[in-house]
Amino acid sequence: MTWYKVDSLSDISIPFIKKVKAGSKSICLVNFEAKLYAVSAKCPHAGADMSEGLCVRKLIVCPYHRYTYDLETGKGGEGQNDFIETYPVEIKEDGVYVGVASIWDKLKNGFK
Ligand code: FES
């Protein structure tokens, strides 16, 4: 897994959704109720920019057709049968980092 610094230390008392880059990935960095989450910035339904959505009850809501995705698991709402990718987030001394697993990391974990 490769860790990318995506933001300077943010004030986590203020909620936000912002689009950041982690390597080649576009990711939504979300501060919801003083906890940071990282999810894919592209909606799997029709490609909307999830950073233009909003958060309700630990769900991110797509700005186009209001599909919802769990911020922790990425699981889509009931009846959607889809998901968005989620990424681990770490706050270090110099900023916020997001971990992105390569396809090889995912394959290796599949065999553990
Ligand atoms: S593009 Fe996101 S719900 Fe349709």
Image (cartoon, rainbow, N blue to C red):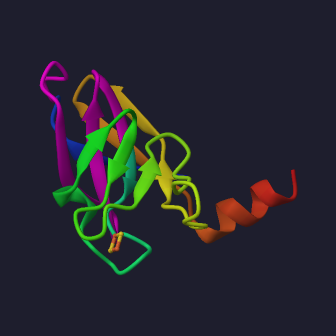
Residue in the picture at 20% in, 45% down:
17
**Res. 26 in view:** yes
Furthest residue toward front: 79
Residue in the picture at 52% in, 57% down:
76
x and y, in percent, of residue 89 in the image: 41, 37
**Quadrant housing residue 11:** top left
**Res. 2 in view:** no
Furthest residue toward bottom: 46
Furthest residue toward right: 111
Q: Quadrant of ligand 1?
A: bottom left
x and y, in percent, of residue 90 in the image: 40, 32
Q: Along the horizontal axis of the image, is 27 left or right of 14?
A: right
x and y, in percent, of residue 7 in the image: 19, 42
* Residue 28 magenta-highlighted: yes
**Quadrant housing residue 57:** top left
78 vs 95, nearest the viewer: 78
Span of residues in magenta: 10-37
69 shown above or below 107: above
12 shown above or below 64: above
Residue in the picture at 28% in, 42% down:
55
